[in-house]
Amino acid sequence: MRLVLLVAALGLAACVEKERVPTGAEDFATYCAACHGAGGKGDGPAAAGLDRKPADLTRIAARSGGAFPGTRVMAKIWGYTGGRNGASPMPQFGPLLQGELVPYDGGDGIATPTPVRLVQIAEYLKTLQE
């Protein structure tokens, strides 16, 4: 009887899987590529319909003296940096801001609890730097 209960419990546990968290590349494709383009150059299919051309995300580090400003990038995605008069054309991305928190040092020397998907997308953006 115990064996049957154990097998049943293991079978049930296998059915209850932890939800898979998308990768930074997957979230970029879902949330960013329409405006910023698949390669992050600011040439996505939706860019033509915007008042201002989306930023070239491959030049973030170059525009910041060669260092990738992870904390600033994540603040922009989060929506903390609203641009002039708080009017940023970039929307906020709720799903990237929810879920598990991980300690992350975005380059400022401070490990801050940060949503894992936000960290992953910032780390993905690092890979696009030219």
Image (cartoon, rainbow, N blue to C red):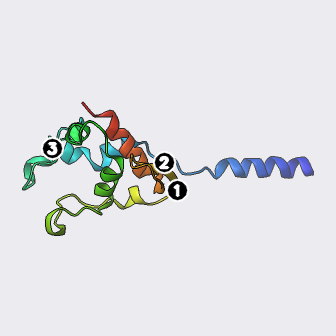
Mark toward the start of the polypeptide (3 vs 2):
2
Residue at left offset 26%, top offset 47% = 32
Say which amino acid is labelled 1. Glu
Residue at left offset 29%, top offset 34% = 128
Query: Which of the two discs, 3 and 1, sits closer to the camera?
Result: 1
Seen as rendered, the residue at the extreme bottom is: 85
- For residue 103, above or below residue 67: below
Dot 2, crowdedness within 10 Å: few (<14), some or many (≥20)?
few
What mark, if any, has residue 21 been given in the picture? 2
Residue 50: x and y in percent read 10, 54
- The Cα–Cα distance between marks 3 and 1, rounded to whole angstroms, is 32 Å
- Residue 96 is at least partly visible in this image: yes
Query: Which of the two discs, 1 and 2, sits closer to the camera?
Result: 1
Say which amino acid is labelled 2. Val
Residue 70: x and y in percent read 35, 47
Quarter of the picture holding the C terminus: top left
What mark, if any, has residue 45 been given in the picture? 3
Dot 3, crowdedness within 10 Å: few (<14), some or many (≥20)?
few
- The Cα–Cα distance between marks 1 and 2, rounded to whole angstroms, is 10 Å
Residue 2: x and y in percent read 91, 51
Tags 1 and 2 in contact by the CB under 8 Å rule?
yes
Instruction: Tell me the residue that label 1 is attached to.
Output: 100
